[in-house]
Amino acid sequence: MGEGGGKADKGGGLSSFSPHLLPLLLALALPMLTTSHHAGLALLPLAFLASYRVRQLVYGRFFLAPLFAVLVSLLESAPLAQLSPATVLSPAVFLPALPLAVAVAAHYSAVSLSKTLGKAARRQIEAFANGVSQYLDRKCYQTRTWPSFLYMKSERVLIALACIVKIALAVAVLILLPITSGVPTDVVGCSSSGDATGRAESMAWVMFGVVCSTEILFHAAMFLSQNVKTSVADSFALPVLCPSYWQWYFVASYAPTKSIWLPVTVECVRIISVSFFRMQDKEDQVVSPLMSVVDLVHGLTVLFGTAFGACSFPLAMLHRLLSTGAIFVLGYIQQRWKKYKTWSRCTKKVACRMYVPVYHKDIECHEHKWMEGVALPKGGGPIKILNEKFKDCKATYVPEVVLERQETKPDFEDPTLSTFISFTRKTKMPGEWIVVDVPEEGGLLISEKEMNTGLEGQFRVLHPLLDSKGLMRYFGDFGGKPMFAAKKYKTDPGGGGQMDEPADIDKMEGAQKSAALNRHVRLLNPYFQDCLMQEKAAEFGRAFNRVENLPVRKVEVLRAVVIEVGTGTPLPQLYLCEQFLDDSVPFRKFNNNDYVPGQQAIQNTPNMLSLFSYFHSNKTLVMCDIQGKKYKFTDPQFHSSDPPFEDDGGFFDDEEEDVGRDWLHSDGGLELQKRVLVGFHKQQTLHSLCNRVWPDQMQEFNDQVDEWMQDEDFAKLLAQMEKSAKMYATYFNNLNPVMDASIGGPYVDADEELDKALKGKGPQMSFDGFDDKKRSMSMDAPQQ
């Protein structure tokens, strides 16, 4: 699947040492670059480094922050050589840390209380949130008197209200700033005198109070709305909840400048932007990073000015500007380096045959722009390519694709069965296709090295593929970037065993080689079926987006094409190619192809899409196993209530036409369809959303589920599966899109952290069952 974010290589190079070594060198160098040396403030760069690079360790023990403030105060009170027991125990050392201690105590108390209230008053909170959500639904969608971006889903109401308060307070500070501090005459605060004034100091403490109160409020709202399932202590380490008010404590405590207006303005703009996007479960990818760059430029300007005696700037602020800005830039460079390492390996030119689906009796295939005005020849034949850029390609309409493969079998006339003879097997693919012959100079470049993704697939491996000249985007009608994921099976999904690499097959002999060769050349249908399944899923996605007054976001379901590399050789290789999802959030599996115990409606959009597919197909299909990033989905599975398609193994000359859906494989039939749908039925928030747009269908659905549950054997099976519900808690906790709406950016490797969260503790979890023999946690990865 189009999965973004591979793991860093374990080898040498920038990616192996930069995450820790470069920031560490920076943290050690900053105190030496300043003209004044303060032993206490010299610890701040190390604190900033630790807060980003070992975030979970630092913020998981955030209650120790006041002790760090005491240590800084102690080292600032006197030189190390002059420290004495009297100095260490002096109230003057402890009193400066009191504001931070009070803030941290209030933070833990408020969050603990919110967690308790969130459980005790859950019904009242849900009633309030539902009331607000329904009111906004009437205003935004039914009467359309308010803009749609003001709509809040019920589970996000408290979070959105907290964000509104944050925005209001940040705006108030921006208004208050020029009133209290006057219009700035020194843009960066690089004046010859950096002495603090009473108004500047007051503004610094106001900023500390605003940041502290709003972060506590948002943290409490997350627990009240049941969006956080971890312990109180662990929640402080979540990227979206990491406190930052401790930074402003040190700024306010250690001499803010007259020109504090620039850091305050930058922070307020960041708060406003991040809060606005958090209200919509989105990540601020522009304003917040830009503010980090402004901080860095500001810090460097002051640093150079200080070196030449033109500035006098407080170290607490300078360290904050340089540390946060520099670590952001280093993280950004690291991310770009990882992408470069992945895509720079795409060096092998690919001459291939590309298969683009254009028709199937059960599927409304995508209408390709390049085919507008082009008539398909009756019975098949060449198609004129209007774009001169791709004149070296040949396009052919093929209403019946038949792939020929050379196989071997024992010569039964040889009593030793040591002789093998070749024969040709013909396999008919479902659907009608445009076949494009792509020359080696067509611009397709593939990496022979597999992509080391954060979630490894059960059946497939991924190879990075670059569409350097736009050929695949043109014929497949894909927009966006030239990066594609080329997927090939490493295991036969039909149970045919493990696939061997061509180089390994060449080294085999006799029956072993014959079996490996046959496994390789017989694995054809699943590639074309996968392509058609994604085409069908995209059809459902387009219909879903056309639903009037849709209470969730619109979706994009990725389409795909099939390419055949090495056509005419003994071991041609098929790949399923789709666009690579390059978003910064981790790749997730949103629902499953079976009943999942303890299902929670953490993200309603994919589940609502699945339920829509059931209604839209007149209850004959349910699209499930939806996975992807944000609202871009891929690699779905379907369960059909129709009789399953019987694959004849490639012998297609039977007189009787097969019943069932030939574009489906791994169809679980009516039994698994029922189990998936019962899982959706248990999600009350999903009921609330679906009742708004499909009230009649939902009533029929409720009656249908009640009827299914009358089957004692079926009910017992689900009850037995439900006993493992707690085993899935970690997975669902990490499925929440609210957790992506942080300013983590380059600071956080989202795929790696999700992988660690699922494997870090507890027994192994699998959508296919529970195995307590393996003491590691891992949901079944997407079937890539």
Image (cartoon, grey):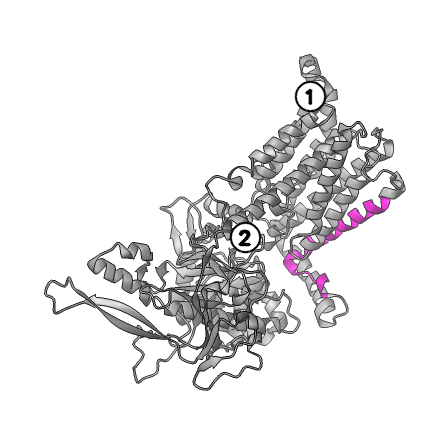
Q: Residue at x 47, y 68 (%)?
A: 561
**Inter-mark Cα distance, 1 to 2:** 42 Å
Q: Is residue 51 visible?
A: yes
Q: Residues within 10 Å of mark 1 (few under 14, many from 20)?
A: some
Q: Residues within 10 Å of mark 2 (few under 14, many from 20)?
A: many
Q: Nearer the viewer, residue 348 or 260?
A: 348
Residue 75 is labelled as 1
Which quadrant would the C terminus be assigned to in this image? Answer: bottom left
Question: What segment carries the magenta color?
Answer: 148-176
**x and y, in percent, of residue 613 in the image:** 52, 72
Say above or below: 725 vs 692.
Answer: above
Q: Residue at x 54, y 52 (%)?
A: 586
Position of 208 compared to 376: left or right?
A: right
Q: Is residue 69 visible?
A: no
**x and y, in percent, of residue 173 in the image:** 82, 44
Position of 168 compared to 335: left or right?
A: right
| Image quadrant assignment for residue 663 | bottom left
Q: Is residue 637 magenta?
A: no
Q: Is residue 160 magenta?
A: yes
Callout 1 amino acid: Leu
The kind of secondary structure element at disc 2 is loop
Label count reads 2
Q: Most prominent secondary structure in the magenta stretch?
A: helix
The kind of secondary structure element at disc 1 is helix
**x and y, in percent, of residue 444 in the image:** 49, 62
Q: Which residue is mark 2?
A: 586
Q: Nearer the viewer, residue 185 or 65?
A: 185
Sequence-first tag of 1 and 2: 1
Position of 546 compared to 562: left or right?
A: right
